[in-house]
Every structure is written in C-alpha cells, then in structure tokens.
Amino acid sequence: GSSLDDIVVSPSGVVLIGFWEVHGSGGGVARSVDGGRTFVVLEGLRGEAVRALAIAPSNPDMIVVGTLSGLFQSPDGGRSWRRITPEGHPDLRNVGSVTVDPTDPRVIYAGTWHLPWKTTDGGRMWQPVHTGMIDDSDVMTLTVDRSNTQTVFATACSGIYRSVDGAQKWSRIRGIPSSSRRTRAFAQSPDDFNRLYAGTIRGVWMSDDSATTWRLATHDDLVVNAILALPGGTVLLGTEGAGVVRSDDAAATWTASNQGF
C-alpha cells in the first residue's frame, strides 16, 4: 500500500528507501544493512509522507528527506531526525526533490510542487530561488554539477532549467521540443560530466556538451520515470510499460532488461 519514490545507497552499502502511503497520509524511511533482504522503518519520521531522499556526498551520515510537510535532516545515518523547515510554512512543503552540494553539506536545494528553495546553513534559513523559472513549476529533480557546484540543473513540468550562480537565477534550456518538456528524470554521466541524460514523457534526450545541444536517444513513445548512469557507459531507464531498459554503450543502443520481473 506504499509508493516508493526514492532509493539511495550509501558508500558503505546501506540502502535507504523513502515511501508514502497511497491510501493514507503517512510514510517514512526504511533502512537495510543487508543489501535489501530485510528492512527496518526508522523512528522519528513515522507518519511523514516522504517524497524525496538524499545523502550528502561529503558526509554519508547526513541524510535529508523531503515530505509533504517540509524537510527533515539526520546527522547520524537515520538514528535521529530534526525538522529543518518551519512547521506549517505555506510554501516550504510538498517537497518532491532534494539534493545536497557535493562539497558542502550545509548547502541544500529543495524542489517543491511550486518552485525551488535553498539553504546555505543546514536549514536555519531558507530562501526561494526561482528567478527565471516559470511560475507554478513542479520541480521534479535537482542536480548539482560535479565539475562546478555553482552550476545546478532543475527539471520540471515546464522543462529543464540551468543556473550558473548557485540557483540565484535560472535559464530555461533550449533544444528539446515542447511536447517533451515534462522531465521526470535527469542524470549526469560519471565518466563525462558534459554528458547529460533527460528522461521525459517522450523519450530520453541526451547532450554531450553540457546542455548546449540535445538529441533524442530513444524512441519518443517511451515514458521515462528514472535514469541511472553508471561508470563504463551503462545507463538504466525505469519506464512506464516497458519496465527497465538498458544501454551498455552510453545510450547508443538499448535492450530490455526485465528478466525476473
């Protein structure tokens, strides 16, 4: 009876899953220390509908989750939690995406169903960061560029946006047709930081020049909900209707990867 919106794995192999009740108002975070064979629901977040989950790259013990009521942070791998957004805030709620700066765990970006927010002090103060973004944009993913942490990508129902100044100003990325603008998934290649993948409701679009130009890398009848770009050119897509689709040559060719489903 739960929807699992985010799965993350820590460098030590701990699996964390954020979930929310489909026919209720609750949810939480589940943790596995045995590769997903068994899970324990963590205390401190029971009853929170978790829609987004991130581990700080520079501090794997720090976990940030986004819920319908705001954002929460754990400094100790999920053993304890604290709210880092004001309770009852009219806009800092309905969080659907979250990411942490790779070099500074105090810098957190949060995407809501209505535009993004940023904190530079671990959640004590938040500021709206939506200049240049179409109003009422549902921010579905947030990605900090691994080669320059001031460059941030956001995907939304209104398209893909890029900021080069830490989300103070956004520019809408061109080159993808408006029919494919709803972008539910986004990934940066771990082998080539200029290579980007955008999963849309009409296929995967790919850029080899850091979003300057784009080309369609799959058929346009593929609805993509998740992208995982792995070292060595392997790319996995989570789709609607086609299950998991796999490429082992950096999106040049694709095959179904559904044996066992």
Image (spheres, grey):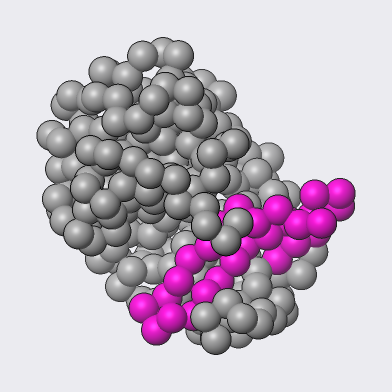
226 in relation to 134, above or below? below
In x, y percent, where is residue 53? 53, 60
Q: Residue at x 37, y 48 (%)?
A: 246
Quarter of the image where the N terminus is located: bottom right
Q: Name which quarter of the figure residue 151 lies in.
A: top left
Quarter of the image where the C terminus is located: bottom right
Residue situated furthest top in the rendering: 178
Residue situated furthest front in the rendering: 259
Q: Residue at x 45, y 71 (%)?
A: 9
In x, y percent, where is residue 127? 45, 44
Closest to the observer, 40 or 231: 231
* Residue 17 covered by magenta stretch: yes
Q: Decide if residue 220 is on the left or right side of residue 95.
A: left
Determine if residue 214 is in view: yes
Residue range in magenta is 1-28
Closest to the observer, 4 or 25: 4
In x, y percent, where is residue 73? 55, 69
Predominant SS of the magenta segment: strand
Closest to the observer, 38 or 129: 38
Q: Residue at x 31, y 47 (%)?
A: 247
256 in relation to 9, above or below? above
In x, y percent, where is residue 234? 28, 54
Q: Decide if residue 130 is on the left or right side of residue 196.
A: right
Q: Residue at x 65, y 69 (%)?
A: 29
The total number of labels drawn is 0
Determine if residue 145 is in view: no
88 in relation to 184, above or below? below
